[in-house]
Structures are given as structure tokens and as C-alpha cells.
Image (tube, rainbow, N blue to C red):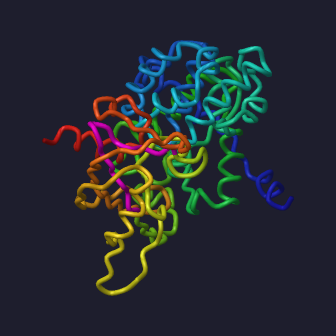
Amino acid sequence: MKLAVEFAREDFHDPDFSATLMAWQKQHGRHTLPWQNTRDAYLIWLSEIMLQQTQVSAVIGYYQRFLQRFPDLASLAAAPVEEVMAQWSGLGYYTRARNLHKCAQRVVAEYGGVFPSDPLLLADLPGIGRSTAAAIAAFSSGRRAAIMDGNVKRVLARVYGVDTYPGERKTEEMLWHRAEALLPEQGIESYTQGLMDMGATLCTRSKPDCARCPMQPRCVAYNTGRTAQLPVRKPKKASPEKHAIMLLMIANGAVLLEQRPPSGIWGGLLSLPELAGHVAAPEEDGHDANAVEDSELLRAVEPFGTMESYERLNTVIHVFTHYKLHIAPYRITLAQRRMMAAQSAYVWLPLAQLGEAALPAPIKKLLLELAGSP
């Protein structure tokens, strides 16, 4: 309660901010992105989910291909989740794809296939948080609601000189309070797009283009020489390192893949079978975390066929949000393949079909390089 009282004492109302931003957006903002110039909530929702933690340049191609396969909400809701994951493969943060599918099914079941316009109802759907709900509502129905993604936090922190880490609860609450107070009475679409555009094209994390920024005269960070220091960065923590030994079994021009559990890292995607999963290596001098005894490999391979030969390939490093993974692939050639009637989580996929498979990006890259090698 004390926090709310503190915020109430501060006057965050600043109509000049929204007026300046909308004038700049009209002349210099982005107006031709594939998901703009429409009120279709499906198109807007899809773009907003894809743009979470992903840059526009990386999203455009996926967005267009996704719509070719799922042109409307009904086709997405009716599709098997495996097809959705396959279309998403390579875009990363795969929980978004699973939630996308669940959300489509709920909108069809609960709202007759029409997205609600109320941001509170939107925020209750899978994968749609408070900020994404506000963006969807603003662009699809002109509802007045505040967004708050990383770009917006950066713009507000610099313009208003917020000198505490935006990710801490008190600072984030203050930023939400300010963002709501700054909303214009009219032109919410232009204002919302302007915030996104300014953060993405001018007020960038590094090397902001202050010379072209309309907020320069009023920007606290610029006028105090602190654009490099604001917003305050998250206190650094050492990134844990984990290891995974993956079995790349090949027989008759096909590779053995295992479907991962629906939740967790790479949830629901096909990947290579692993020994012991993603584990931290013991801290011992000279210890090779990715070494495997011949007998251990034989035991792991035996259910799937008779091992003819194996070789350890170069380690692949993949960085997740919370840890760095060292992947040690062992390429195993089978002399004979066994039937797998009782092992429904596994599938033999022809190497020629790898490009269309729902695989994690580092695994797909590894396999495609393998398929292209002699």
C-alpha cells in the first residue's frame, strides 16, 4: 500500500511526451511491416507473440511462412501441435509456440474464434501477458492500454532518468504507473507503435541515435551524459555451464530422433537421444565431462541396433537464457537396426527430411551439416 501512495504523489502526467512521440512516428516511424495497417486481431496477436524477445528482422520470414500454413485462427487451432512446432522451429523460445496453439484453441472454444478486446481478458489467455494484451487491444480495437517491454523500459528510463534497475519490483511498478499516466486520449495506435519504433530504431541499447531523437531536448540521460549507463543493467551473475552427450545414430540414410517432453528446454521438439541430459560437469582438473566409455555407449545403443563404429564429433556450444550448454555429439553407425514398436518417443527420420523437421536450431544445424558431408 505504501508503494501506491508514493506513486500517487508523483505527477507522471506529461502530454508533451505523447504529442512529440506521435508526431515523430507519423513522419519517421515504421508503417509497412507485414502485420501493420490491419485490425485483424489474429494477425496482430501472431506478430506480437513472435516479437517477444525476437527482433523484427528475424520474425518477418517466419511470420509470412506461418501464415501460409495457418492463414486464420481456426486452422491454427485445428492443427496438431507437432505441425505448429515444426513451423516455429528455429525461432527459439518454444514455449511461445505451445502457448500459441493453446491460446488459439481457447479463443475458438471460449470466444467463438474472435479475440476479446478487453486487455484483462486477453492477458488471461496462454502466452499473453499484460504488455502483449495491451498491444493487441490497442492495434486491433483502439483500446487505451499501456505496453511495457524492454524497448519501452529503455526509453522511459533514459528520458526520465530512472537510475534503478527496471527489473526490480519497485522500479517496474513505477514504470507501469508512469506508462499509464503518459497514455494519450486519442491516437493510441500511433503512440504505441511510436514507443516500439523509438526503442527499436533510435533509443537502442548500444549506440543510440540521439542526434535524430525528438526526445533529445528533454532526455535526462542525454543531458547528463548517461545514455550508456541508463537503463541500469541487471547485476551480473555467473552463467552456469552444463554438458550433454548426444547420440547421433545413423542407419540406412536415417537418423534416430527422440521427442522431448512437452515442458522444459526444447519442449515437444524432436532432438537427439541424450546420456543423462543437461548436467553440470564436476569441477576436477583434467576431467573430460564429455568422455564416454565404450561399454556405456554399447548399452545406450543396444535397444536400437548393433553398433558398427562411432566417432566423437566437435563440441557444439549453445547459449540459453540461464546457462551455456556444451553438446558432445557421438556419431554412431549401426550395422543393423532393431524394431522399435514399444518405443513411441523415438523415430527414424530420413536425412533428406531434416529441413522440415521440428528440431532445436543447434541440433538442426548439426544434422544438416552432417547430411551435407560426404
What secondary structure is the magenta-colored segment mainly?
strand
Tell me the residue at 73%/18% (across/down): 108
Magenta run includes residue 258: yes
Most foreground residue, 35 or 12: 35
Image vertical order of residue 172 relative to residue 204, above or below: below
Q: Farthest residue in the bottom direction?
A: 285
Tell me if I can see residue 167 in this picture.
yes
Count the numbered circles shown: 0
- The question of residue 372 being in magenta is answered with no
Please provide percent x and percent y for residue 245. Answer: 38, 62
298 left or right of 106 in image: left
**Residue closest to the eye, 308 or 152:** 308
Q: Quadrant of the rendered structure where residue 170 is?
A: bottom right
Residue 64 pos. (x, y %): 42, 19
In the rendered image, the quadrant that contains the N terminus is bottom right
Q: Which residues are magenta?
A: 244-259
